[in-house]
Image (cartoon, rainbow, N blue to C red):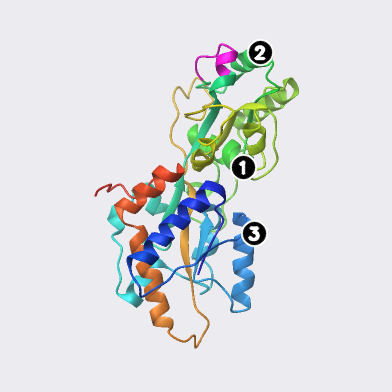
Amino acid sequence: MLWHSFGGSLNYALDKIVNEYNQSQHKYYVEAINKSNYQNSLTAAATAYRSSTQPNMLVSYEIGTAMMIYSNGAIIPLYELEKMTGITIDQSDFWPAVSGYYSVDGKLAGLPFNSSSPVLFYNKKALAKAGVTHPPVTWQELTKVGEKLIQSGQGCVMTAAYPSWLLLEEFSAWNNLAFASANNGFDSMKPKLRFDNQTVADFLTQLKTWQAKGIFQYGGRLGSADTLFTSGKCAMIVHSSSMLADYSKLTTFKVGVAKIPFWQTKDTRKPQNTIIGGGAMWTFALPKNTPNADLIYKGVASFYQFLAQPKIQAQWAMDTGYVPASGQWGG
């Protein structure tokens, strides 16, 4: 059993892959179950584990990585699963930036699957109407672009989903600023936030000014800002690349995709890099004395091996907008 949080087109894309796996062999069967959003699925899985009704696999977002790794035995790391089953996955196939995020001492603990990157989506129709030829490259350009869009009758220029992720963590990484101590939290279980710097303060102050002018609109936590963009109210949105699957199906306007803006200063003339988003698949330990436990673990490992294939990674990326976790695209 696999619990996940993919809705809409993403749910359809996952079901297609799961069905393909089930039809490729007849020894194991995977059932994928949608458990609403990431927070709900993680909470539900933790509750289920305490009552010995946990799923075999859970897709958890990158924020839950530390919880998965330090789960006190609830989660079986991928490298241990490989030892238990004899079914291996070539870690070298994955992009280092992706595999490193889900590794412990250089060994994969979770299977990278739905890796995403923050991007800027924009309403091509709205920008053309305002005479805007391209979305802003820097945040400073948003003022001029925003004024043109407002003058053209646009009710809101830009919004952002998951603001703590996109407007703080990713903003910091993109502008080569520390978000937290201890290598941005990767080297310690007790990091301290470090985004209390002048650049972030200036950016948040500017957001407040833009909010008052209608150039920026806060859409709430998590992905609730999504409807501000899909309804046409806001002309642009900073969001996960995974939204391409649904946005490409919009019929009221065509959607463009661009890099997220960076905050230009005398020390920052070009952006640095963003931090991987999305999530990975994690294996729950079975309750003691579970019948056929060895067979179940082998089924999980077999499914992971199937997902790691370059052709499946390519299919998933093209169907969703997620970044392929593997760099070895092939036939």
- State the SS at label 3: helix
Q: Which is nearer the N-term, disc 1 or disc 2?
A: 2
Mark 2 or mark 3: which comes first in sequence?
Answer: 3
User: Dot 2 lies on which element?
Assistant: loop
Specify few, some or many for label 2: CA neighbours under 10 Å numbering under 14, 14-19, or 20 or more: some
Separation of residues labelled 1 and 2 (CA atoms) = 28 Å
Q: Disc 2 marks which amino acid? A: Ser
Q: Are marks 2 and 3 in contact (CB under 8 Å)?
A: no
Q: Residue at x 31, y 56 (%)?
A: 309
Using the image, determine if residue 142 lies above or below residue 259: above
Where residue 244 appears, x then y in whole percent? Answer: 49, 38
Among all residues in the image, which is located at the extreme right? 212
Which residue does the numbered mark 3 point to in the structure image?
40
- Residue at numbered disc 1: 162
Mark 1–mark 2 CB contact (< 8 Å): no
Residue 284, position in %: x, y?
A: 50, 71
Q: Tell whether 35 sits left or right of 331.
A: right
Query: Camera-side residue: 108 or 148?
Result: 148
- Secondary element type, mark 1: loop
Looking at the rendered image, the disc whose residue lies closer to the viewer, 2 or 3, is: 2
Whether residue 182 appears in this view of the structure is no
Mark closer to the chain start, 1 or 3: 3
**Mark 2 vs mark 3, CA separation in Å:** 40 Å
Under mark 3, the amino acid is: Asn
> Residues under labels 1 and 3: Cα distance?
15 Å
Q: Residue furthest left?
A: 331
Magenta span main SS: loop
Label placed on residue 309: none
> Circle 2 is placed at which residue position?
152
In the image, the segment drawn in magenta is: 127-134
- 262 on left or right of 218: left
